[in-house]
Amino acid sequence: MTRAIEPMLQGSRPRVATSAGAKNPQIATTELDNMFNLYSFVQQFQPNSTIVLHGDPASMIYRVESGTVRCCTIGADGSHQIFCFSNKADFIGISDIEQWHFTAEAVDCVTLRALPRDVVERELKVNVQLRYEFRLKLVQLLQRREEQLLTMITKKAPERLFRFLCDFASARHHAHGGAIALPMCRRDIADHLGLSVETVSRAFSELKRSGQIELITCEKFRIPTPPDTKSLLMVG
Amino acid sequence: MTRAIEPMLQGSRPRVATSAGAKNPQIATTELDNMFNLYSFVQQFQPNSTIVLHGDPASMIYRVESGTVRCCTIGADGSHQIFCFSNKADFIGISDIEQWHFTAEAVDCVTLRALPRDVVERELKVNVQLRYEFRLKLVQLLQRREEQLLTMITKKAPERLFRFLCDFASARHHAHGGAIALPMCRRDIADHLGLSVETVSRAFSELKRSGQIELITCEKFRIPTPPDTKSLLMVG
DNA sequence: CGTCGGTTTGATCCCTGTCAAATTAAGTGG
DNA sequence: CCACTTAATTTGACAGGGATCAAACCGACG
């Protein structure tokens, strides 16, 4: 199959559509997205199934179509450290060469599109735009980790959780005010934020108590639109 | 000056020496090192002087020749978060495009070699090997941050410090047993490990007490060779 | 309706941050 | 060379946040 799509790539190399940048203008994901749209195949994963395993040959690059994936390393004692949750439109495998440097597991029912890595690698050799996208994504990934490092050190549990919830909401393209369902359990959130389950739960309670979030059920929350100066003026 | 060295690059593109891999065999830094050896110029920095400033145009790539550099972000309140200390042979600027995404400051007297970025960028367009080196370094940088994230969360102060000291020792190419001088102050170490100065100091005392390190002076330490099975057998 | 896993809440302990003081180191000027 | 100043490091006391252990609560499911 790799062989089948390779010659097609040579000719096409679309430089036209810069469509994806609607809500994230500075990121042009066109080339890689185009390759996925044209040459990838669909794969389904059940909740908690393993998608890629740390150390295995990284023969594919994935794009999340639906569902949520947790990317983590698993310690010798079985403890998880979740670096990120990947949602719709996120790529998995940008940061790996030859081998997977982490494990990816399905949080809920996950649909992925898979693109053979050697196809991407071959295209990288001839496509300047794709190379730039790759590099940009890698750099952004690094900067994200550095931000995480910073919040881990400086912020307390409730704020860490609040930021995570806001990030997750915006990753799901939810405006403030809409109810959002969390696909992952408290344990996953704890492993992502570097906390214990109990502390995560307490942080939820704290955020609820202080009115920063509303908890409809244990896995559905809402971030109430903060009353800004304008709406306050309109009320008064 | 950029203009002056550009045509030279076109012709040369040395692919010969794979010399640098003596103690780090899997990393071939040949291409980038060659560019530095051939086309960079030397710059000196006094202790605590700013080398690059977060947000400024990243017009250079640097290689540390001597001294130690701290790479950090500085919060609005003036707090530093030091992501890494760069020592001899380390590069600065691999992870940046257009702008610096961090601030770099000289810890002690620092000698750098500077290479104009546009020269590197131009060479990247035509040099496959250099591209691979860049990508590999970026990926390794990312993996290092993820390791840091993990130790920050799971390890307590004394072990964090111990790992840092071991890493620093090996970065300085010191075998176990030799005395090593720390160029940076306690404040810097604290900002790197996400601790307070006092806790760092206590961690030093703790490591000294437990015999994991020897403190000759406050800035000179030694990691005693742990008695392995062999030497134990020889004694007994 | 009972079981089981996930979530919440409670009680306690330990690590680390903070404030404060003591000690050491490094200059500086006489 | 010594007295004095000043910064850096170390140590002490205390309080707060989070981990841990334990129990209660809740929801899904057979």
Image (tube, coloured by chain):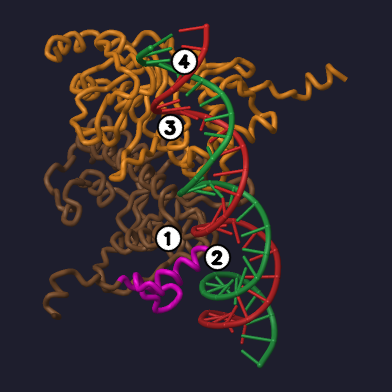
Chain colours: A brown, B orange, C green, D red
Which region is colored magenta? A199-223
- Cα gap from disc 4 to disc 1, whole angstroms: 43 Å
Residue occupying image coordinates x 40% and y 76%: A215
Residue A160 to residue A96: above or below: below
- Residue placed under numbered mark 3 in the picture: B188
Disc 1 residue type (three-letter): Gln
The answer to whether tags 4 and 1 share a subunit is no
Q: Quadrant of the N terminus of chain A?
A: top left
- Cα gap from disc 2 to disc 4, whole angstroms: 48 Å
Disc 3 residue type (three-letter): Asp
Please tell me the numbered disc located at residue A198. Answer: 2
Residue occupying image coordinates x 27% and y 8%: B38
- Rendering quarter of residue A216: bottom left
- Residue placed under numbered mark 4 in the picture: B21
In reply to whether residue A206 is colored magenta, the answer given is yes
Residue occupying image coordinates x 58% and y 36%: B203
- Rendering quarter of residue B48: top left
> Which of the two discs, 4 and 1, sits closer to the camera?
4
Q: Earlier in the sequence, mark 2 or mark 1?
A: 1
